[in-house]
Image (tube, grey):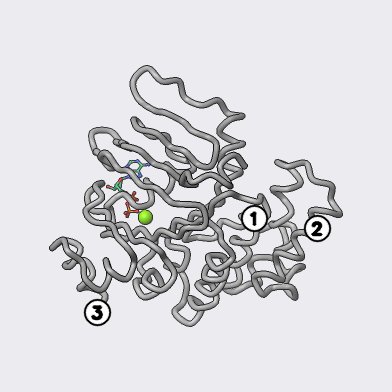
Amino acid sequence: MANETSGEPKIAITRLAKSFGGNAVLKDVSLTVPAGGVVALIGPSGSGKSTLLRCINLLVVPDGGEVRVGGDAFRFGPGTRLPGIKALARFRAGTGMVFQHFNLFPHLTALQNIMEGPLTVKRMPKAQAEARARALLAKVGLADKAEQYPSRLSGGQKQRVAIARALAMEPEVMLFDEATSALDPELVGEVLGVMRALAADGMTMVIVTHEIAFAREVADRVVFLRDGVVVEEGPARTLIDAPRHPDTRAFLAHFH
Ligand code: ADP
Ligand code: MG
């Protein structure tokens, strides 16, 4: 896409604001991610992490600020027009989102779950969609689960199908919202393994996570959010090993 070879960031969030009713959830948040960069977003419950992630793919429409992913930019604020349905759908297709609770279609097999987007949104020929879906299942280590329904899969397997389903839309960026928080501890590793491989492949990613060791290892940068404000951000190891802000220190102390 447009900025692949330029020095511009792949994701640029500028002065984002979002309130629900009178509750200001994001206050002047800015964030950039270079192409191939991995940013981990950490912070206490209710700090606005999910809202920020949802603003990046416009599942939540910001009140103010700018959202740019690749070559698509949207400005928000008094007097600006909201993007139309078509522009929104095209934009969202380029930002893969993985949620805490898989959200697979229960009446479709693993393979069909992955084919659904390419078939209906991209109008891809069925044979091609199936070949790509099988390749993606192999990539997440589930080649032998193609014909299984979600109810027959473990949480870790379901989440890996959900990641493959997002990848099937050939997103420019991947957004993960606590993708391992609902998993039994012994299943966390297989999902983190897939995320680690994606990062190593050069995917641009924003990861909301409580897996601090994983963030330290895989993310280039960590952003600490509290009460809708970026309190501190920096290189992953520096921020996690030697946080400067007392609130970051207090938050990270919970994980020792
Ligand atoms: P986090 O993911 O860091 O736990 P969230 O972004 O989910 O934080 O929520 C931040 C705040 O925004 C919370 O106070 C939450 O109740 C509120 N909030 C989130 N989504 C909505 C919504 N759709 N309507 C009203 N309030 C919301
Ligand atoms: Mg959340």
Quarter residue 19 falls in: top left
Relative placement, left or right, of 237 versus 137 is left
Residue sitting at the far front: 6
Amino acid, disc 3: His
Q: Is residue 201 or residue 51 the one in the foreground?
A: 201
Report how far apart the C-alphas of labels 1 and 3 lie in the structure: 38 Å
Q: Which residue is mark 2?
A: 130
Q: What percent of the width, then of the height, locates residue 225?
A: 27, 54
Tag 3 or tag 1, which sits nearer the N-term? 1
* Residues under numbered marks 3 and 2 in contact, where contact means CB atoms less than 8 Å apart: no
Q: What percent of the width, then of the height, locates residue 80?
A: 41, 20
Amino acid, disc 2: Glu
* Residues under numbered marks 1 and 3 in contact, where contact means CB atoms less than 8 Å apart: no
Q: Nearer the viewer, mark 2 or mark 1?
A: 2
Quarter residue 30 falls in: top left
Report how far apart the C-alphas of labels 2 and 1 lie in the structure: 17 Å
Does the residue tagged 3 have its C-beta within 8 Å of any atom of ligand 1? no
Q: Which mark is residue 105?
A: 1
Report how far apart the C-alphas of labels 3 and 2 lie in the structure: 45 Å
